[in-house]
């Protein structure tokens, strides 16, 4: 029998393998469950560590060829994906994006007085760059797809 993990992060089928102290059954905590995802055929996976100084706006608007999954180690990331409102993901939080055509508008440091660090694993389509910047003309053409901006 194989062990499975449900969406709440509980292991099933593990009782037959439990020893006197089965800490391995409770050691993992699910942080994110993203679905549905589409991984490009023949994709490779890349995990990177990103560090932004205080107030750094991060990467300009861009997209990835496949899905990306991130975890904030410290600080807070200002995250904005096309069609979704801007949000701040604090240390211990996760984010994901589907990749493909969706524009990732922001991934910068939401803090003006501290560094922010996160790790992100991306599934990259063969022959495609990990990250592709979006031109100003495309941003203008797709402006109607961007969620309303927070008022100042």
Image (cartoon, rainbow, N blue to C red):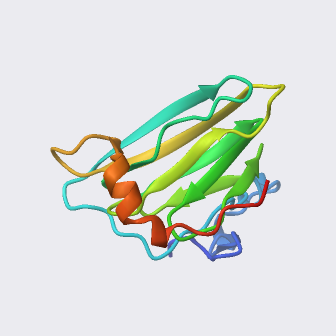
The residue lying toward the viewer, choosing from 12 and 135, is: 135
Q: Position of residue 97 (x, y in %)?
A: 49, 60
Left or right: where does residue 61 sit relative to residue 71? Answer: left
- Outermost residue, left direction? 127
Depicted 49 relative to depicted 101: above or below: above
The residue lying toward the viewer, choosing from 25 and 113, is: 113
Identify the residue at image location x=25%, y=61%. 40
Left or right: where does residue 114 sit relative to residue 145? Answer: right
Depicted 129 relative to depicted 82: above or below: above
* Residue 134 visible in the snapshot: no
Left or right: where does residue 137 sit relative to residue 10? Answer: left
Residue 6, picture quadrant? bottom right
Identify the residue at image location x=59%, y=56%. 80
- Outermost residue, top direction? 53
Identify the residue at image location x=33%, y=56%. 138
Left or right: where does residue 44 sit relative to residue 33? Answer: left
Q: Position of residue 71 (x, y in %)?
A: 64, 46
* Residue 113 visible in the snapshot: yes
Q: Position of residue 101 (x, y in %)?
A: 33, 63
Q: Position of residue 1 (x, y in %)?
A: 50, 76
Depicted 74 relative to depicted 54: above or below: below
The residue lying toward the viewer, choosing from 111 and 76, is: 111
Q: How many marks?
A: 0
């Amino acid at each position: 029998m194989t062990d499975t993990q449900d969406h709440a992060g509980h292991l099933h089928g593990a009782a037959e393998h439990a020893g006197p102290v089965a800490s391995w059954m409770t050691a993992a905590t699910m942080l994110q469950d993203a679905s549905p995802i589409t991984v490009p055929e023949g994709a490779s996976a890349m995990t990177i560590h990103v560090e932004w100084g205080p107030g750094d706006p991060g990467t300009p608007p861009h997209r990835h060829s496949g899905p990306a999954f991130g975890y904030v180690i410290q600080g807070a990331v200002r995250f904005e994906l096309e069609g979704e409102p801007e949000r701040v993901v604090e240390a211990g939080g996760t984010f994901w994006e589907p990749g493909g055509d969706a524009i990732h508008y922001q991934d910068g440091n939401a803090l003006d007085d501290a560094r922010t660090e996160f790790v992100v694993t991306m599934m990259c389509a063969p022959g495609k760059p990990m990250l592709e910047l979006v031109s100003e003309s495309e941003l203008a053409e797709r402006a109607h797809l961007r969620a309303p901006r927070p008022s100042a």
